[in-house]
Image: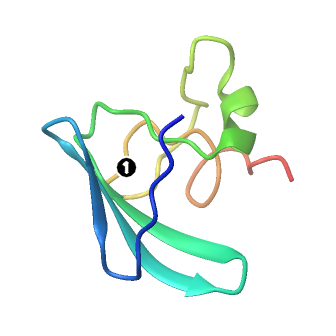
Amino acid sequence: MLVLQRKRGEDIVIGDSIRVRVLTVHGSSVRLGIIAPAEVLILREECLTAAGPEGEAAPGPAPPGRAGATCGPGSARPCPR
């Protein structure tokens, strides 16, 4: 595991096409923004099991700009909590 320290507004670049930016930090909560090609499936860990073993998307509409989202706002099923 690679461990990095970033401040608000700083980025991490993964490969040629994925960028992760620290948007806000509030106590122990960090809000991240992710820029990636539409074909890259991006899930919170708790949504990974909801996606199934092969990472198939749940039926129903995905949020605008994020085809392949499997749970959460705009999806057919909420993420498990």
- Mark 1 is surrounded, within 10 Å at the Cα level, by few (under 14), some (14 to 19) or many (20 or more) other residues, namely some
The colour scheme used here is rainbow
Quadrant assignment, res 18 = top left
Quadrant assignment, res 59 = top right
* Residue holding disc 1: 66
Residue 19, position in %: x, y?
A: 26, 53
Residue 68, position in %: x, y?
A: 44, 36
Q: In screen coordinates, is 27 left or right of 66?
A: right
Q: Nearer the viewer, residue 27 or 32?
A: 27
Q: In screen coordinates, is 40 left or right of 32?
A: left
Decide: is 32 above or below 68.
below
- Residue at the far left in the pictured view: 16
Residue 43, position in %: x, y?
A: 55, 42
Q: Nearer the viewer, residue 45 or 77?
A: 45
Q: Nearer the viewer, residue 34 or 67?
A: 34
- Residue at the far bottom in the pictured view: 26
Secondary structure, mark 1, is loop
- Residue at the far right in the pictured view: 81
Q: Quadrant of the N terminus?
A: top right
Three-letter amino acid code of the residue under disc 1: Arg
